[in-house]
Image (tube, rainbow, N blue to C red):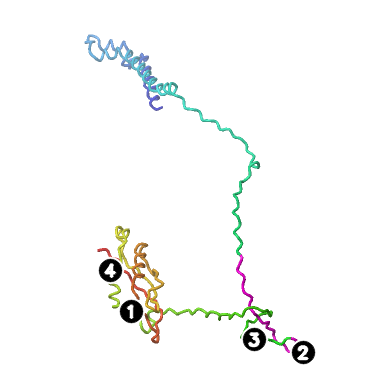
């Protein structure tokens, strides 16, 4: 658009200069005759002024033709080329969803009923609480001998005499001592120096941490059991997933320790050690 405006302005100015008949117009014929009187009119300036109008017309026609070609070519090509296919019209059809029923999957057959095996009838003796009363007792309560030979129940019935096993003892919650609280601390076979030598030989630097240059100390907490085995191993303070996993594996692979003791008795002791990873 700016190009068109500039061309139009130049054309208008050229036309105005052509029709300007004042003395100041360099293209005015009378002025040119007086200026070039008794001079060599074959000189270039006189010829340029005389032929200006003709050259201006030729230039305008050429510019109009060029502009028409530039602007009209895309329009002509768009008309001559293949037309873009019109988008296919989508027909909307109303569907009654009530006509469609959800297909229910076939329900699997019910599992066979498990019939528990018949239990033997156990001989029992009805236990009756003794209450103070003036009325005569029709059925005396079972004696201690009867209760020791059979099982007490709410009813009396005949059956097999089965010795009821005694109830299991309640689980004993063994105390786990901290390292500073035991009289005799756990000891790795050969001492702590051998333990760190064992960890150094049995740890492998993970590839990802090695390539990334990650290093540091992983603090591992574990429990030395009463038999010296290493149990309840976990990370107390980690560095990275790869180093933490390798430190856990190395500590779990340690041989049995000499267990800690309290009053000469082996006890569980909680221990914390650092596993050092350094890049060489």
Mark 1 touching mark 2, by CB under 8 A?
A: no
Q: Earlier in the sequence, mark 2 or mark 3?
A: 2
Residue that badge 1 annotates: 187
In front: label 1 or label 3: 3
Q: Which mark is residue 146?
A: 3
Q: Tell me: residue 104, above or below residue 126.
A: above
- The answer to which quarter of the image holds residue 210 is bottom left
Measured in 3D between alpha carbons, the distance from the residue under mark 3 to the one under mark 4, in whole angstroms, is 70 Å
Where residue 53 appears, x then y in whole percent? 33, 13
Magenta stretch in the rendered image: 115-138
Query: Does residue 131 show up magenta in the picture?
Result: yes
Relative to residue 133, is residue 172 drawn left or right? Answer: left
Secondary structure under the numbered disc 4 in the rendered image: helix
Q: Tell me: residue 178, above or below residue 207.
A: below
Q: Is disc 1 surrounded by few (<14), some (14 to 19) or many (20+) residues within 10 Å?
A: some
- The answer to which quarter of the image holds residue 182 is bottom left
Q: Earlier in the sequence, mark 2 or mark 4?
A: 2
Secondary structure under the numbered disc 1 in the rendered image: loop
Mark 3 touching mark 4, by CB under 8 A?
A: no
Quarter of the picture containing the N terminus is top left
Measured in 3D between alpha carbons, the distance from the residue under mark 2 to the one under mark 3, in whole angstroms, is 22 Å
Residue that badge 4 annotates: 201
Measured in 3D between alpha carbons, the distance from the residue under mark 1 to the one under mark 4, in whole angstroms, is 19 Å
Relative to residue 177, is residue 280 drawn left or right? Answer: left
Q: Tell me: residue 101, above or below residue 20.
A: below
The residue at 33%/79% (across/down) is 187
């Amino acid at each position: 658009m700016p190009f068109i405006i500039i061309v139009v302005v130049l054309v208008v100015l050229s036309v105005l200069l052509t029709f300007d008949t004042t003395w100041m117009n360099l293209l005015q014929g009378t002025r040119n005759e007086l200026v070039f009187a008794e001079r060599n009119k074959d000189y270039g300036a006189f010829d340029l002024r005389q032929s200006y109008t003709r050259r201006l017309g030729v230039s305008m026609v050429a510019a109009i033709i060029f502009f028409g070609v530039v602007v009209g070519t895309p329009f002509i090509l768009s008309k001559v080329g293949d037309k873009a296919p019109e988008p296919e019209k989508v027909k909307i059809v109303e569907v009654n969803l009530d006509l469609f029923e959800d297909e229910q999957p076939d329900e699997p057959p019910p599992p066979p009923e498990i019939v528990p095996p018949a239990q033997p009838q156990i001989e029992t003796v009805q236990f009756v609480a003794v209450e103070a009363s003036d009325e005569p007792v029709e059925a005396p309560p079972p004696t201690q001998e009867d209760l020791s030979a059979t099982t007490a129940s709410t009813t009396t019935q005949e059956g097999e005499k089965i010795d009821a096993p005694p109830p299991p003892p309640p689980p004993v919650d063994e105390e786990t001592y901290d390292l500073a609280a035991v009289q005799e601390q756990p000891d790795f076979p050969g001492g702590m120096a051998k333990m760190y030598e064992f960890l150094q030989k049995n740890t492998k630097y993970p590839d990802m941490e090695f390539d990334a240059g990650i290093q540091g100390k992983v603090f591992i907490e574990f429990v030395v059991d009463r038999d010296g085995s290493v149990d309840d191993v976990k990370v107390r303070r980690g560095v990275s997933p790869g180093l933490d996993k390798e430190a856990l594996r190395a500590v779990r692979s340690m041989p049995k320790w000499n267990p800690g003791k309290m009053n000469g008795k082996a006890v569980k002791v909680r221990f914390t050690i650092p596993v050092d990873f350094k890049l060489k």
